[in-house]
Amino acid sequence: MKNLQETFTELLRRAATDLPADVESAIERALREERRGTAAHSALTIVLQNTAAAREASAPLCQDTGTHTWYVYLPDGHPTEEIRKAIRGATAQATRKSYLRPNQMESLSGVNSGDNLGAGHPVIHFVPWKKPGLHADVLLKGGGCENCSTQYSLPDQRLGAGRDLAGVRACLLDAVHRAQGRGCAPGILGVAVGGDRAVGYRAAKEQFFRPLHDVNPDPQLAGLEADVLSCANRLGVGPMGFGGRTTLLGVKATRLHRLPASFFVTVAYMCWACRRASVTVAGKDVRFSQTALAGRP
């Protein structure tokens, strides 16, 4: 278990300090779109400087090292308790090594646990698969962007949104407009259409494991993603709400079955620091990557 704990500690280091290449490339493209001398251009320049400094120093990309959500794929029937202990041990070890900042606190007392461990944290999902070995994906999501996440129940009279794709679109653009750059824009939207309230949020967050450059195989959702991204970036909100041409870096959506009485549209909002990393362990072979399995449509 010690070797697995060390592997997971390294995985957390990579997730917290090394921005995925697809996200960094999207920010670089956004910088080229903004006019020099503007607050938007300056903000994105600082973001990229911060990204390079964090990678070089193995220091956190953000002082809020977030809620950790794990997806662990392992052979069906494999015991999970050892893996759970390794993840918890790695979380405490990564905090001691300052890859993570101690963020987690008890809700009512406000007492910080000091090691990022506590009731409900980290979040761990185990997924059985038929392959040998183990694959783990981890996502770190900060509290500021989580505050901008929201959920709609259609029809929505305020928006004039019905139970159709146009209604979904209205919800997503409303969510971006209401955020007004809070949550450290440019952001990424993870979207779940349907499901119940709880499943909707889980599915929406899973979308952040998708690389920004992928194309949704569902033609309707692919069209929705491209349309909302284009429209949101014409709102003029811009990086950090300073105005500009880049309010979102990406939109990733999935759809779920629902009950006739309910039509939820769940919007998970992610800041520019979309921190995720993956590892595959097969015997003594350990391979780190930025290729996640969780959240694939």
Image (cartoon, rainbow, N blue to C red):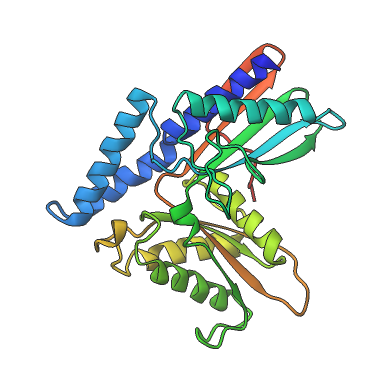
Return the residue nearer the eye: 207 or 145.
Answer: 145
Farthest top residue in view:
284
The residue positioned 31% from the left and 31% from the top of the image is 52
In the image, residue 172 sits, relative to residue 70, either above or below, namely below
In the image, residue 176 sits, relative to residue 211, either above or below, namely below
User: In this orientation, does residue 144 appear?
Assistant: yes
For residue 4, side relative to residue 13 (left or right): right
For residue 282, side relative to residue 147 (left or right): right
Residue 186 position in % (x across, y down): 36, 55
The residue positioned 76% from the left and 25% from the top of the image is 82
Return the residue nearer the eye: 246 or 19.
Answer: 19
Farthest right residue in view:
77
In the image, residue 105 sits, relative to residue 16, either above or below, namely below
On the rendered image, what quadrant is the N terminus found in? top right
The residue positioned 56% from the left and 73% from the top of the image is 168
Farthest front residue in view:
109
Please tell me how many numbered marks the rendered image carries. 0
Residue 190 position in % (x across, y down): 54, 57
Residue 97 position in % (x across, y down): 47, 23
User: Residue 135 occupies which quadrant of the picture?
Assistant: top right
User: In this orientation, does residue 255 appear?
Assistant: no
The residue positioned 47% from the left and 33% from the top of the image is 100
For residue 232, side relative to residue 79 (left or right): left
